[in-house]
Structures are given as structure tokens and as C-alpha cells.
Amino acid sequence: MYEKITPPTTGAKIIFKNGEPVVPDNPIIPFIRGDGTGIDIWPATEKVLDAAVAKAYKGTRKISWFKVYAGDEACDLYGIYQYLPQDTITVIKEYGIAIKGPLTTPVGGGIRSLNVALRQIFDLYACVRPCRYYAGTPSPHKNPEKLDVIVYRENTEDIYLGIEWKQGSEIGDRLIKILNEELIPATPEHGKKQIPLDAGIGIKPISKSGSQRLLRRAIKHALTLPRNKQQVTLVHKGNIMKYTEGAFRDWGYELATTEFRNETVTERESWILGNKEKNANISLEENARMIDPGFDSLTPEKKAQIVKEVETVLNDIWATHGNGKWKEKIMVNDRIADSIFQQIQTRPDEYSILATMNLNGDYLSDAAAAIVGGLGMGPGANIGDSCAVFEATHGTAPKHAGLDKINPGSVILSGVMMLEFMGWREAADLVKKGLGDAIANAQVTYDLARMIEPPVEPLKCSEFADVIIKYFS
Ligand SMILES: NC(=O)C1=CN([C@@H]2O[C@H](COP(=O)(O)OP(=O)(O)OC[C@H]3O[C@@H](n4cnc5c(N)ncnc54)[C@H](OP(=O)(O)O)[C@@H]3O)[C@@H](O)[C@H]2O)C=CC1
Ligand SMILES: O=C(O)CCC(=O)C(=O)O
Ligand SMILES: [Mg+2]
């Protein structure tokens, strides 16, 4: 059935119904070990997850692991340049849920990212990366416990589509010529701009459908959070990239105020409603002045537009959201991308779900992981409607590969996300307890050990896994 691999002899497939996994007691779960430090962190992860499932369910539930290949290991087995064999794609499609270690992507030339390819092949459009603090984790920040965010990153488009042309290539040069001579002059807002003739060219597609399906999932997730975390922040650089990043913001607000009208309030709406609650007789114009600090210097047309916005909000949602009812809704706001990088450091507790396009989310998830202890503590999930692949935020960390040194925490916590996605909460909770107790007792790998004051002797990667298991009970 497969070219070079054989499924485990016991176990059954996970299937998806209406976007949700239906999980048997003995699911077969494919895993990719990963390049670089994958050789260290995958065995540690498998050991911890197996021990948690065994302890939580006393033999009534068990995962049958199915090894599939990608990256360097795949080339060793399948032959030169076989980085992502068809076997691997077929198996993940058939079995629905998989977990992977990191895979190498060369910079500049060479193969395109296998990690990105997997997300695109299986249409895993939501990259979900929670960044929350485990007590006792050393951090470069004074109050890391204040950060508890989930980066919800669009995972299939943006520049990650990989449509780009090298400087000097025939098609790249043709495209620049067409843009310079036909398309840019035909677009008055571009004036006399021209693309330098020696430029490389990349395309950044951001679609309405792609943005809204990600944001739909983010808002639904927010609905499941405790009241004080029911917030979705649309992160964008829409002041500069108006029709891609700016559109992402606009499509987000559109979705929130149509499909989720009864469940959401936007930040601007909350100001308008709040102004009227404080002063029932406030005029539309005075209300508009209060929500827009530069109101008085605006053109008459722009002023009229904001007054109309105030009127529409009060007409449309005063009955459902007014008199403080908006405080019970999911708050949807937006922040410009550069600003959110400082906001998660200066006002960490004001944020919850950070919904982003692909590139912004890639950057932001590493930065947020650093605040709560580093990349060794950053788990993730790539989720679609019929498949999910769990993986850490970090990469292959090649300088540490094979040394039994690196922190397996991120892949272990990705495993926790997988167990929760499967509905195996008891096993997930055991792993979180074990990891939390190990950290609280300063029994940690080098990355955390070096930040503890005074520094402690680091555990090996494999020893850290054993300590986590020890703290199950
Ligand atoms: N999803 C994936 O598979 C991803 C793959 N990659 C790929 O990985 C390769 C290497 O990328 P690189 O930029 O070096 O980024 P990495 O994330 O692999 O590593 C950068 C640094 O982060 C720290 N780090 C990473 N993982 C851990 C961990 N588990 N525990 C503790 N510290 C950790 C280490 O810092 P220090 O040495 O200071 O301790 C490490 O040197 C590239 O080919 C890249 O494309 C990158 C990201 C994601
Ligand atoms: O695919 C890669 O090599 C890098 C991907 C990455 O950095 C990420 O998904 O966070
Ligand atoms: Mg990244």
C-alpha cells in the first residue's frame, strides 16, 4: 500500500466529522522525527506522551505511533531530493492528526520550506501558538506571568505562498517591464513610481476568504475562553500595505459585525456606546469628537462620515449592546504590527488572541515565546477542517543537534495541544503538571538553567523528559 513504510499492526484511524476529530481509544498517529534537534526532542516527547496516556487511562487508551519521513531522513530512505515522499502525504491525509519535529529550510536558494508545504498541502489554515507562562520559568522579562496570548496565524497565503522571481530572471524582468510600462502608469495613485530594474520580485496575496476563515476560527476560540480573555486583536501593517494588510483588518471587522454580530463588539463601537452611557443626551457630533481625537481638523466630508458611523452604531446595536451589555461580548480591536511587538511587552495583560497574517504571526510567535521563557517553551498546532499537524514554534537549532541538550518542552507542549484536540484532557493535564513541577523545582535544560539566578546545573534533554514523568504523581 505504501512504498517504504508499514502502518502499526494495532490501532485505528482518526476521522474528521464536521471539522472535529472522532478519536478511537487506540488511534494511529503519524509522526515526523524532524531534522537537527528532532533527533533529541522527538524521543523525549514520545516517551512523555506515552507515559501520560498510560497513567491517565490505565491501559484503556494508547497511541500507536506511525513513523513517516520528511527532510533529511526521507532522503536517506527514499533517495536523493525525496524530501517529502508521497507516502508521508498519503498517510497524514488518511490518519488526520500528525505531530512533527522541525525541518530545515535553506536560506536564499535550495528547496522551499517543507513545513510550509505541509500546511499548504493539507490546507492547515490556522497556525495556533499559545504563549503562556509556567510558574518558575526564568524569563528576560520582569512579569512574564502577565503574558497569556494565543497567536492565531493565517497559515497558507501571504508571502509564504512562495511566488517570487529572482533578480535578473527572464520572467522577473518581464514582470517588472509590464508593471513599469503598463500597470503602474495605469494606476494613478502610483504616480511616477517605478520598480528598480535590478529588483527581485515577490507576490503577497491576502484573500478575503483566507483571512475570514482564520478569523472565524479565532473568534470561535475566543468564545471558549474565560470572560476576561474574550478578545481578538487584528494585527496588521495596514497603514503601509492598505490592500493586503489593511484589508485583513477590514475583513476581520466585517466578519465580526456580521456573522458574529450578537457575540462581538468592536473597540470603536464600545467607545461610542460608552460615551452615550456616560451622557444619555450626548449629540452625535460630540460623540464623534470623542472617538476621534483629530476630529476638529478633519475635512467636512470626513467629519460627516464619522458622525454617520456614530449614528449607525447607535441605531443598529444600542438595543442589543447598549447599557453595558457590550461588556459581555468579545472585544474585537486592531493594532498595527510594529506597535503590537511593544504592546506585548509593555501591556501584556491587555491582550488575548492575536490574529495575524502569515509573516507577522511568524515573527510575533517567536517574540511572544521569548517573553515566557524562550523557544523551548513555544508549542503550536496547524489546524484545518479535515487535518491537524502539531509542531513547535522553533526550528531545527542545528548547533545543538544530537547533543541530548536541547529543551523538548515546545514539542511536548505541542503534544499536549494534540491530546487536548483529541479530547484526551486527563493525559494533557498530567503532562502540564509534570512540566510545571519540573520547572518550579528548577530541574530544567540548559536554556532555562542559564537564566535562573544563581544558574543551576542543566539537565539533558532525555533527563528532562524523565523528570517530567516523575512529577506526574
Ligand atoms: N516549523 C519548523 O520546522 C521550523 C523550521 N525552521 C528551520 O530551522 C532551521 C534553523 O533555524 P534558526 O533560525 O536557527 O531557528 P531555531 O528556532 O531552530 O533556533 C534558533 C535558536 O533558538 C533557540 N532554540 C530553538 N529551539 C530551542 C529549544 N527547543 N530549546 C531551547 N532553545 C531553542 C536556540 O538558541 P540558543 O542557541 O541561544 O540557546 C537556537 O540556537 C532553519 O532551516 C529554519 O528554516 C525554523 C522555524 C520553524
Ligand atoms: O519553514 C521554515 O523553515 C520556517 C517556518 C517558521 O519559521 C515558522 O513556521 O514559524
Ligand atoms: Mg518561525
Image (spheres, rainbow, N blue to C red):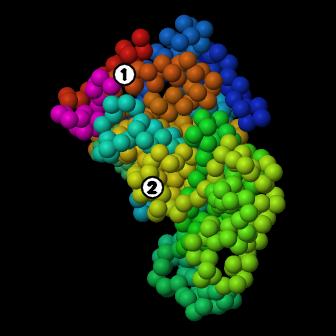
Picture residue at 37% right of the left edge, 46% below the top: 370
Horizontal and vertical percent for residue 89? 62, 40
Q: First in sequence: mark 1 or mark 2?
A: 2
Disc 2 residue lies near ligand 3 with CB under 8 A:
no
The kind of residue tagged 2 is: Gln
Which of 199 and 22 lies nearest the eye of the viewer?
22
Picture residue at 68% right of the left edge, 26% below the top: 14
Q: Which residue is mark 1?
A: 437
Q: Residues within 10 Å of mark 1 (few under 14, many from 20)?
A: many
Quarter of the image containing the C terminus?
Answer: top left
Which of 259 and 111 lies nearest the eye of the viewer?
259
Q: Which residue is mark 2?
A: 343
Residue 409, placed above or below residue 254 = above
Q: Is 463 placed left or right of 15 in the picture?
A: left
Total marks drawn? 2
Q: Residues within 10 Å of mark 2 (few under 14, many from 20)?
A: some
Picture residue at 24% right of the left edge, 35% below the top: 452
Q: Which residues are magenta?
A: 440-455
Picture residue at 42% right of the left edge, 63% below the top: 108
Horizontal and vertical percent for residue 155? 59, 51
Question: How far separated are the C-alphas under marks 1 and 2?
Answer: 30 Å
Residue 431, placed above or below residue 367 = above
Q: Is 185 placed left or right of 280 in the picture?
A: left
Q: Secondary structure at mark 1?
A: helix
